[in-house]
Image (cartoon, grey):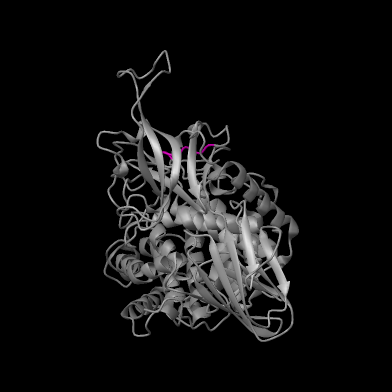
Amino acid sequence: MTVGVHRATTPGGPVVPTPAAHQVLRPLGHDAVTVRPTGWLAGWRERALDATLSHVLQRVEEGEARGNLARLLGDGEPVRGMPFTDSDVYKTLEAFAWAAGSLDPDDKRLDRARELVALLARVQEADGYLNSWVQGHGGERWSDPQAGHELYTAGHLFQAAVAAQRTGALPGLMEIAVRFADLLLTRFADPSSPYVDGHPEVETALVELFRATGETSYLDLARHQIERRGHGWLGEGRFGSAYFLDAVPVRRADRATGHAVRQLYLLSGALDVAVETHDQELLDAVARVWTDLQVSKTYVTGAHGSRHRDESIGDAYELPPDRAYAETCAAIAAFHLGWRLLLATGEGRYADAMETLLHNAIAAAMSTDGTSFFYSNPLQVRTGHDGGHEDAPSRRLPWFSCACCPPNLARLLSGVQDYLVTATEHGIQIHHPTPATVDAVVAGAPVELTVRTGYPHDGRIVVEVEHDSPQPWELSLRIPGWCGRYGLTVDGVPTPAAADRGYVRLHRDWAGRHEVTLTLDMPVRLLHPHPRVDAVRGCVAVTRGPLVYALEEVDLPPGVVLEDVRLLAVLGVRATADGVPAPVVDVRVARELPPGDALYLTTPDTGTGEPFDVPLIPYHLWANRDPGAMRVWIPGPAEGAPR
């Protein structure tokens, strides 16, 4: 396998705004960024292409997802599983479409993916309808908007088809999608129709289908879906209309609420509509809700969703670490939304949020072998926790009854290079540094960038620029929000440059070859929670660069209970530890010794054992050695430690 070789037939990856869209930044072509195999991100992506794609494809083929479609051909067996199992097929196909240029053309997995497309064509009804759950039960179409997920599932079909068209992979998939989308137009295009799906997703997919086909009716339908939502048409259901994001019109929303994945997919769709229709009011509404998320409802890992009961975002500052739902799909949805906001505004804070998500909440969801996963991503697992249930495990699992997360990870990582770099008419912007080469056209001439870095474990980023034209243009490099100090040189000469909206911007004549070196200071930092996050009051989180660190039970001496450990001091950074393929942070801790077995004490006095030293590991690597207790927020703070 060669990582990062692409043969795109249409410029761009998952998000390609039209030339008329209101965008500050433009994504590059799907084949513009070649991720080099030496980097952390490339290793993760290659693992996904080798192991995760195979694993997900096999599970889809052998499980309910493919089985439900095949049963429509007449074996008489009832459909099984969730009403939305078709979406697992679609996400898997999207992953293979983005990955196709990185795979050997003779890779047998591509043949199996094409067989899935052929199966879809066989079971699609004459008028374009395609949903194995409804077809298999002989049910009435569109009769269960709360839980049927018919439009949600269709949305994932549309996104897979767009990927297939833009990469030249999986022929026939776009034709299937267009037939279904045209059926939706006949059923839902009337602006007076109140119908919305209980699970948003089709909105962003319809906009991308419009971008890929030029059919403006798809954009109109997406806009209608956004405008219809928020008027209570879906009813209360078990968790109330806010769960469905149907309590407040999108334009009037000022709080993030309801089911976390649904909220984030809805915001993505609204933003896509806003930039294509130049609707500033709608764009402002999305940014307003995003801000509410960031200031009071986001875990330090970037994750969202504090409640298991309804997979919801929860109240302001309701961020319990041990009961965090923090679903993997919500992290991926937030990453997608952050990308759209970044393209629309050019503001580095959105790239900062993407970085936190990618290196922590998303990375933690996959094992180091690429074949087991977390559905929920807690920030603390208590000693003795029963991790047998898939919603709150203490180790990753190979699959889930609701299998949305593994194929979602596969489709993100198959095209993750599409989210690293952007361009404008007058410059290139590097948002997420990783060893790579970048091919673009700026100021009318080709530009090749070569990025060398050990990021996220090292803050030194070298960018070699090769350009043939003397026409000046601007190279922008992101300065992460966590970075307090940095140094910049151009061809070895120190170059002062103040960050502007999160970026240093170098505007000059780049003709010939030049080398830019950005050095980000990466000290260990202790983060203290807002006082209203009472679940972790009195605790600190240890971070370095974009990485959040965690204490695992496996690193404690025998007999020491993780909940008794208090942080005393940060000792330093070590290149690796046993079984940990990344730098660790060594800390000094002490064991608190509660007096006796009393659950409640009349005095807070406790004894303290002798201090000892332990490593903290990157949070995304937890549960890859032995299952057991873990925590991100550790009682502290450490006196004299960096803050």
User: Dividing the picture into quarters, in which one does residue 191 lie?
Assistant: bottom right
The x, y position of residue 416, in whole percent, is 49, 68
Judge whether 204 appears above or below 123 on screen. Answer: above
Q: Point out the residue furthest to the front here.
A: 493
* Between 29 and 427, the one nearer to me in the picture: 427
- Dominant SS of magenta comes to loop
The x, y position of residue 517, in whole percent, is 59, 68
The x, y position of residue 410, in whole percent, is 41, 66
Does the magenta run of residues contain 530? no
User: Dividing the picture into quarters, in which one does residue 493 lie?
Assistant: bottom right
Q: Quadrant of the C terminus?
A: top right
Number of disc labels: 0
* Between 333 and 294, the one nearer to me in the picture: 294
* Between 505 and 5, the one nearer to me in the picture: 505
- The answer to whether one can see residue 493 in this image is yes
Query: In the image, 400: left or right of 238?
Result: left
- The answer to whether one can see residue 24 in this image is no
The x, y position of residue 356, in whole percent, is 52, 54
Q: Point out the residue furthest to the left here.
A: 558
Q: Quadrant of the N terminus?
A: bottom left
Q: Which residue is at 39% across, 16% downward?
A: 601
Judge whether 189 appears above or below 606 on screen. Answer: below
User: Dividing the picture into quarters, in which one does residue 490 lie?
Assistant: bottom right
In magenta, the rendered stretch is: 318-323
